[in-house]
Image: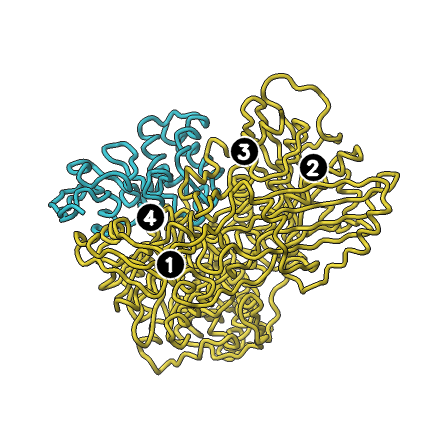
Chain colours: A yellow, B cyan
């Protein structure tokens, strides 16, 4: 079998913990020596303009890349190792990647917007290229050969014309710091970049990039050796649980200490509206949380009836609007031109699409360990953005940010702003209160019930056609809850449950999204409107980024509507798209997906009469995202008796520029498709007037193995000349529309509300 | 909470004596008393399978199984399956298919698959899908899982 060669940091080392790097991470090489010797080899400050901030070469030749982002199993760290290996000319197996420990990595923005490679790799690539250049200079001096006369293979520098004259990287720098300055762009987060004098390689020089190298993290996970945040243990650590109110927005007014008197050493911690329990043992904390009798303030039920959700969105006055898309600048909404064009149309097509709240529903309720001392703190977190977690904890504990260390440890997968950041704040409050390290992990009902939700929305589309059936006007309006009721990170306690409960002010900002496509419709207006959150305090229906923020909602609507127009003018859905698409890469993915799927050119719904209970159909949807473009064909079976939909086959054409690791890309896309399919077919956060009632996997079901497709084929369009643009999210947004379009093709029924449950599908067939 | 009692467990062929609440789920004994942290807390409701261990050859949800009820029985966890040098066939297949993404659920899928295939490796894809249907994976690695379990089934048959 494949033996995993990339070195990694073992669970035992991590669990043992300790102040020094050598103990915490069992990290081999020079950094350890430098830490221990403390002086003879001075470490430059962890600054973006220092080559040493990005990589090191140990005495044994191992290379460590310091990466200020994280990976949740899509292979970003593996890709970084590939990129560094190629730039440095060292074997892939010799490169390890240390991710998101604020003590050793820069703030590269954490995991965010599928930028792991697109943005995150850039400074590491430049630093590796610069390190190679510096090493060649050092070798030149040592060997007495001009740098141009040297070549590097597997970290060994040789004279081109005299191979016996050679020196290894580690003989030049092993265990030492480079002390080389880079040109830093003065930015932090995703935008951070730094360049050296060296020019990175061109794509034709890559040897490891572009190959399906085995993912670094897989063996540790399969042998149960990977440390997760839930597995962290600290000396003297207690366990905590936070008590959430039965009616959202209610404040604790008192509690009955006797109700937990049978639990050894259990204590209640109350700070303003925050109430939790701690106990030396986890089982004790769990029981204390279950048993503690808390009295709560009387509050008005904060939510509408669930059946009223979409009308509530329609009738609630918006507080902000923007025609500038989700992440662009603010563009005023001017309805004049599009309305005028619509007035002049021979025919108007209109439709409205509804999308519910959806839960991250991570596999484990969020967990964090915080050791808050009087003058410093350490946070072990599964958050995608440990640097931001550190900032938030520092503010909450009123400590200088440099006195707080954030250490990312793998957690249950997150797909945006899930509940990980909340757990860190909960643990910080509890740890500070009792003066011990505290580990917090929620129970399942808190994971589903209180994690940040993907926002619900109603999207209205209107198209105007001329007499010949050409689209002359296209109007897209999204109205819903903001994606930024909770920001995409926890750098401010205001964006966390605990922060709000201990008195930080609510900090809702407004954002939604519009379609990302290149259709040439002569007059186009795409804009969004947002309404205020239900609650101005900690809320189980707070909304935030959830994988491909607003992509699924927006493109379910926009790409379903494209098919509605195509059907109205009697055109094949692929042909219709190709008629209006302008970007050659968009055209290429649509053509590639159709070709690979064996797409039969005809209108939808299919005209031939199908016998039996099972109807089959096919649909396509396309959308781009941040430079990546994707077209997806879905083939479905619809049971007209039960209403059950099985998406049997997907064909995805995916163009994200240069492909770093084809196998990693395939699996990442498969994960996107399955998760998005689950959201399209099954996921809807249930609530009543008081609280969220989707509190477990029965009340919030997700796709299971019997419902998984028979096949997902990924057509990878590699464009080596185009810098990589990311794959973590872009193939999420087409899925709901592709499936809805396939259901329409099979049955003639148009589904305009997610999820496509059997009841809903059956009702639409009636 | 009940008073603590002495409980003897056999985990991965090692014996342990513990002083714990006998009603406490096995999961917490494994994770917190024995530092066997491969099984994960996912739901505490036996709905997701992240905590699955094998007890006397059968896959069981350790989050809903009292530690008392597992006394004197053979408990296997992911840590007791195989090693990188000598992997269990199911682990080998999971590595070849690079199954886990976040990996939080993977111990449960592995243990359930091991119990299924050790009982009888001659399983069709439909049987495998059905037998694994009560497990959850939020990253959506279902396709890799199914490829891996089918591959392991062939290897073990």
Q: Secondary structure at mark 4?
A: loop
Separation of residues labelled 2 and 3 (CA atoms): 27 Å
Residue A165 is situated, as x and y percent measured from the top left of the image, at: 49, 71
Separation of residues labelled 3 and 4 (CA atoms): 36 Å
Residue B81 is situated, as x and y percent measured from the top left of the image, at: 29, 41
User: Which numbered disc flags the more N-terminal residue, 2 or 3?
Assistant: 2
Find residue A738 and report its image quarter.
top right
**Is label 4 on the same chain as label 1?**
yes
**Is label 3 on the same chain as label 4?**
yes
Q: Secondary structure at mark 2?
A: helix
Q: Quadrant of the C terminus of chain A?
A: top right
Mark 2 crowd level (few <14, some 14–19, many ≥20, 10 Å Cα): many
Residue B79 is situated, as x and y percent measured from the top left of the image, at: 28, 45
Name the chain letter of the residue that bears numbered label 3: A
Q: Which mark is residue A224?
A: 4
User: Which numbered disc flags the more N-terminal residue, 1 or 2?
Assistant: 1
**Is label 2 on the same chain as label 3?**
yes
Q: Which mark is residue A251?
A: 1
Separation of residues labelled 4 and 2 (CA atoms): 41 Å
Instruction: Check the image and report above or below for A487 versus A401.
Output: above
> What residue is shown at x 39% (from left), y 37% (from top)?
B135
Residue at the disc numbered 3: A757
**Is label 4 on the same chain as label 2?**
yes
């Amino acid at each position: 079998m494949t033996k995993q060669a990339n070195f990694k940091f073992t669970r035992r080392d991590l669990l043992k913990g300790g102040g020094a790097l050598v103990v915490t991470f069992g990290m081999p090489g020079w950094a350890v020596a430098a830490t221990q010797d403390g002086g003879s080899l001075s470490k430059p400050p962890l600054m973006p303009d220092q080559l040493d901030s990005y990589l090191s070469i140990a005495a044994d030749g191992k290379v460590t890349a310091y990466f200020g982002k994280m990976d949740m199993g899509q292979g970003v760290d593996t890709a970084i190792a590939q990129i560094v290996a190629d730039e440095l000319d060292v074997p892939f197996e010799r490169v390890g990647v240390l991710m998101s420990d604020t003590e050793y990595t820069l703030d590269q923005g954490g995991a965010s917007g599928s930028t792991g490679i697109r943005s995150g790799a850039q400074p590491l690539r430049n630093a590796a290229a610069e390190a190679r250049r510096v090493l060649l200079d050092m070798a030149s001096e040592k060997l007495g050969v001009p740098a141009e006369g040297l070549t590097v293979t597997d970290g060994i520098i040789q004279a081109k014309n005299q191979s016996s004259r050679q020196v290894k990287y580690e003989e030049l720098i092993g265990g030492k710091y480079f002390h080389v300055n880079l040109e830093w762009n003065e930015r932090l987060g995703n935008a951070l970049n730094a360049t050296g004098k060296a020019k990175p390689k061109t794509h034709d020089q890559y040897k490891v990039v572009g190959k399906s190298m085995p993912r670094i993290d897989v063996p540790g996970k399969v042998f149960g050796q990977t440390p997760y945040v839930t597995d962290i243990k600290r000396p003297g650590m207690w366990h905590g649980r936070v008590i959430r109110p039965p009616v959202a927005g209610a404040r604790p007014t008192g509690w009955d200490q006797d109700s937990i008197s049978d639990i050894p050493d259990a204590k209640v911690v109350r700070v303003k509206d925050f109430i939790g329990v701690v106990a030396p043992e986890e089982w004790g904390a769990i029981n204390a949380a279950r048993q503690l009798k808390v009295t709560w303030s009387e509050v008005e039920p904060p939510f509408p009836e669930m059946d009223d959700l979409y009308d509530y969105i329609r009738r609630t006055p918006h507080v902000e609007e923007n025609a500038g898309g989700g992440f662009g600048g603010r563009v005023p909404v001017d309805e004049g031109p599009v309305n005028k064009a619509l007035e002049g149309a021979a025919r108007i097509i209109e439709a409205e699409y509804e999308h519910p709240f959806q839960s991250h529903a991570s596999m484990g309720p969020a967990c964090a360990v915080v050791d808050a001392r009087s003058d410093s703190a350490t946070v072990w977190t599964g958050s995608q953005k440990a640097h931001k977690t550190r900032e938030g904890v520092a503010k909450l504990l009123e400590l200088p940010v440099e006195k707080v260390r954030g250490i990312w440890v793998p957690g249950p997968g997150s797909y945006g702003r899930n509940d990980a950041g909340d757990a860190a704040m909960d643990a910080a409050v509890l740890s500070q209160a009792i003066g011990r390290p505290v580990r917090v992990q929620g129970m399942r009902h808190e994971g589903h019930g209180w994690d940040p939700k993907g926002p619900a929305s109603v999207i209205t589309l209107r198209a105007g056609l001329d007499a010949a059936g050409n689209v002359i006007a296209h109007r897209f309006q999204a109205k819903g809850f903001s994606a930024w009721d909770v920001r995409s990170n926890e750098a401010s306690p205001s964006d966390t449950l605990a922060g709000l409960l201990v008195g930080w002010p609510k900090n809702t900002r407004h954002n939604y999204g519009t379609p990302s496509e290149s259709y040439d419709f002569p007059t186009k207006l795409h804009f969004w409107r947002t309404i205020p959150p239900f609650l101005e305090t900690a809320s189980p229906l707070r909304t935030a980024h959830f994988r491909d923020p607003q992509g699924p909602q927006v493109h379910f609507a926009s790409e379903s509507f494209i098919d509605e127009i195509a059907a109205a003018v009697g055109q094949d859905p692929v042909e219709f798209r190709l008629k209006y698409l302008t970007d050659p890469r968009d055209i290429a993915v649509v053509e590639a997906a159709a070709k690979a799927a064996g797409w039969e050119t005809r209108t939808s719904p299919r005209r031939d009469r199908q016998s039996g209970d099972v109807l089959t159909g096919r649909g396509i949807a396309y959308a781009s995202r941040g430079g990546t473009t994707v077209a997806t064909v879905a083939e479905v079976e619809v049971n007209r008796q039960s209403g059950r939909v099985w998406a049997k086959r997907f064909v995805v054409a995916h163009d994200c520029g240069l492909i770093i690791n084809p196998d990693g890309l395939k699996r990442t896309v498969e994960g996107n498709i399955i998760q998005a399919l689950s959201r399209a077919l099954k996921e809807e956060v249930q609530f009543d007037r008081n609280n969220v009632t989707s509190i477990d996997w029965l009340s919030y079901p997700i796709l299971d193995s019997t419902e998984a497709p028979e096949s997902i084929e990924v057509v990878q369009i590699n464009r080596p000349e185009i810098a990589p643009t990311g794959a973590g999210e872009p193939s999420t947004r087409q899925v709901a529309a592709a499936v809805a379009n396939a259901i329409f093709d099979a049955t003639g029924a148009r589904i305009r509300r997610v999820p496509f449950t059997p009841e809903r599908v059956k009702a639409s067939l009636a | 909470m009940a008073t603590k009692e002495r409980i003897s467990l056999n985990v991965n062929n090692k014996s342990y004596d513990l002083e714990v609440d006998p009603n406490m789920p096995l999961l917490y004994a494994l994770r917190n008393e024995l530092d066997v942290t491969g099984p994960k807390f996912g739901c505490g409701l036996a709905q997701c399978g992240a905590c699955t261990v094998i007890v006397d050859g059968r896959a069981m949800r350790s989050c809903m199984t009292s530690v008392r009820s597992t006394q004197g029985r053979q408990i296997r966890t992911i840590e007791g399956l195989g090693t990188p040098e000598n992997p269990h066939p199911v682990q080998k297949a999971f590595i070849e298919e690079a199954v886990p993404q976040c990996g939080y659920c993977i111990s449960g899928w592995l243990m359930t698959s091991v119990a299924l295939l050790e009982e009888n490796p001659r399983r069709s894809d439909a049987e495998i899908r059905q037998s694994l249907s009560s497990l959850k994976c939020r990253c959506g690695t279902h396709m890799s899982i199914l490829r891996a379990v089918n591959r392991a089934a062939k290897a073990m048959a």
